[in-house]
Image: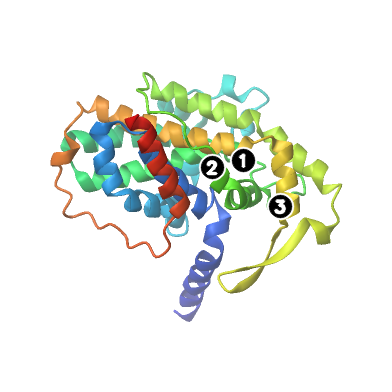
Amino acid sequence: MRKIFSVIFIAFILFVFLAPFAYSWGFFAHKRINYMAVFTLPSEMIGFYKKHIHFISEHAVDPDRRRYTNANEGPRHYIDIDHFGPSPFDSVPEKWTDAVTKYSEDTLKVYGTLPWNLDLMMYNLSDAFKKQDAQKILRTSTELGHYIADAHVPLHTTQNHDGQLTNQKGIHAFWESRIPELMADNYNYFVGKAKYVDKPHELIWQIIRQSHTEVDSVLGFEAQLNEQYAPDKKYAIESKRKKSVKTYSEAYTRAYNKMLNGMVERRMCAAVYTIGCFWYTAWVNAGQPDLNKLDDKMVTDPVVKKQDTVAAKIGKEILRGHEE
């Protein structure tokens, strides 16, 4: 019993201190992406989504939190497409049943199920709209946003997801957490209004392909930069959560971002737009129910201690632009 308690306690400590840096875009970026996606929506939808924008933003990280308690959650966030040979997109069937027949469900779960999970989430969101279930609409929209954002990250499409195969351990959080935390307040979130997607399944795979084409640059540029920086210039000690934490220095981060030529901003803003398009598409496919008539009394919006004032300001500017 004592041993079980110890394991649980250690898992909890790891979650508390490592969760924000371990997976996906990082808590900051996931919240920002979902928040900004709300402002891509048409007038028929934005009222409901904006009313619950803190739910959509704060719960954007729930899928990452589940990775510590649900063994089935991890594979939903990635697909190690390069496991399937030199021409993986010619080898892996895009249809789930065909992929299972060819590789088995167990194999797919080992190497990731992200694109098929997105198919399922889109179905679930349309179903929630049809049933006019406010809580399910918000929950599914929020988590769909998380997985779409993951699909835009190059390192979510490769076995070398954290540079562990090329002596670049830590590059995952560097690319998708450290860079946005330093740069994202200056990104251009004016991505346009959401549009209907005729074939979401095809767009999902297109996004995965595009992300995977960036993998060599993500790894290659960092390897080049590493040769130019001594360890004491590459890393810095910063205070986070009242603790001293070793992280990539600001100079090293900015140099890497420059080499990437805005890749992180492009992928982050593309995620914002795609999320809006998928929310809108699911709503249209459900018959465009009146969201203003939904019973959302059971929805508990979180109390946000620290407002994202930058995102709120940009959102107001986007709305003003739509009105004009």
Secondary element under disc 1, as helix, strand or loop, is helix
- C-alpha gap between disc 3 and disc 1: 12 Å
**The C terminus lies in quadrant:** top left
Residue in view at x 75 percent, y 45 percent: 255
Give the left or right position of residue 6, taking residue 123 as reference: right
Residue 262 marker: none
Dots 3 and 1: beta carbons under 8 Å?
A: no
The disc labelled 1 sits on which kind of residue? Leu
Q: Residue furthest front?
A: 324
Residue 110 marker: 2
Label 2 neighbourhood size at 10 Å, few (<14), some (14-19), many (20+)?
A: few
The disc labelled 3 sits on which kind of residue? Lys
| x then y, percent, for residue 211 | 59, 32
| x then y, percent, for residue 95 | 43, 24
Residue in view at x 73 percent, y 57 percent: 249
Residue 303 position by quadrant: bottom left
Residue 317 position by quadrant: top left
The residue that mark 1 highlights is: 155
Give the left or right position of residue 300, taking residue 146 as reference: left
The residue that mark 3 highlights is: 169
Which is closer to the viewer, label 2 or label 3? 3
Tell me, yes or no, if residue 79 can be seen here.
no
